[in-house]
Image (cartoon, grey):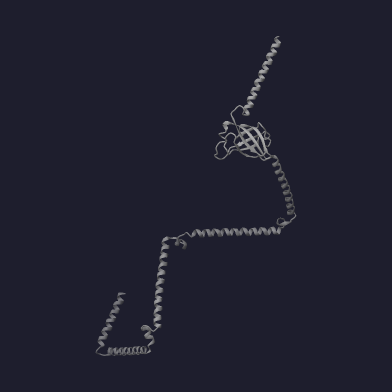
Amino acid sequence: MEKFTSQKIRLGLFVIIGLLVFILAVYFIGDKQKIFGKTNHLEAVFNNVNGLQLGNSVRYSGISVGTVRGIEMINDTTIRIDMIIDKAIFSYIKKDAVATISSDGLVGNMIINILPGKGDEPSVQAGDEIQTNNRIRTEDMLNTLSVTNENAAKLTVNLLKITKEIIEGKGTLGSLINDTILSGDLKETMRYVKLTTKGASETVAKIDKLVASLDNKNNVVGVIKDSAVANKIKKMVTNLEQSTTEINTVIENLNATVLSIKDGKGSINYLANDTELVQKIDSTMTNINEASSKLNENMEALKHNFLFRGYFKKQEKAKEKAAKAEENKK
């Protein structure tokens, strides 16, 4: 009897412990799946879920905030995902947030990652649909790698062909590598190019130096830059313009005078064209010259006359005295 009672007690304890374990398991699983908390629905549309299953985790900025509650096939390219998100997180998720499907680690289950938006949008509401970014499928990656491998193989074949032709001396590059004379000419050309470049550099340096020296006030350009000198030059140009105007006026007057002479106007034209008057003037000048000559002869005669000899000697002495006085002053 005692043995039977102890067996019942052990069975009861086992049942109670098993029930407690079951309750704890349900609690932890429900807490992880957001069954017992306050949640709201959020939707996203993908064209490929990449193996996503019901109950997979939903994360926001790396934090687990909900689970996948529904996967509905709309058409062959549209799949709607229903997510249960912790209600407290809704205030942080903005309308410009983006949902993507990725794996939990290298070989883990597929999860939905919600990435924060970059704008200043309002928070999402229950039942809203957020933007999605479809993940590149493994098949697409493999197809791309396959095409890349084919292109790499073709490129390798072409490179081998080009290398073989270069080694055999075919083509321009092969000739350059294998022809020593052409190689020497190329080196000589490069040397001349180098020398020319050096000369060009020196010329540019001299030009820079010349341009820099233009600001020197001792140079012509530097002098012109001086405002005072510039004003003087402007004044000189103005004076030259005025002088040119006056010269033009004088020339016009001379032209008018010449024209008046040619037209027979004025005393000059009268003297030039009246031959009788000219002959009279010549005769008068001849008579004046003869009278002057006779006057000189009379003066010489007076000097030798005994009456006037003393007078002229006094004048000569006075002149000599004045000359000596001038020499003494010097």
User: Where does residue 10 sit, x and y in percent of width and height?
Assistant: 68, 15
Residue displayed at 60% across by 60% down: 196
Extreme residue toward the top, this view:
1
**Toward the viewer: 160 or 253?**
253
User: Where does residue 162 sit, x and y in percent of width and height?
Assistant: 73, 52
Height in image: 97 above or below 203?
above
Question: Would you identify the image quadrant in which residue 40 lies?
Answer: top right
**Toward the viewer: 135 or 175?**
135
User: Where does residue 118 sit, x and y in percent of width and height?
Assistant: 57, 40
Residue displayed at 39% across by 87% down: 273
Picture quarter with the N terminus: top right
Question: Would you identify the image quadrant in which residue 175 lies?
Answer: bottom right
Extreme residue toward the front, this view:
74
Task: Left or right? Give the position of 15 relative to 319.
Answer: right
Question: Would you identify the image quadrant in which residue 308 lies?
Answer: bottom left
Count of number-bearing discs: 0
Height in image: 157 above or below 223?
above
Residue displayed at 64% across by 23% down: 24
Picture quarter with the C terminus: bottom left
Height in image: 169 above or below 243?
above
Residue displayed at 47% across by 62% down: 221
Task: Left or right? Give the position of 243 relative to 40.
Answer: left
User: Where does residue 232 sit, x and y in percent of width and height?
Assistant: 41, 64
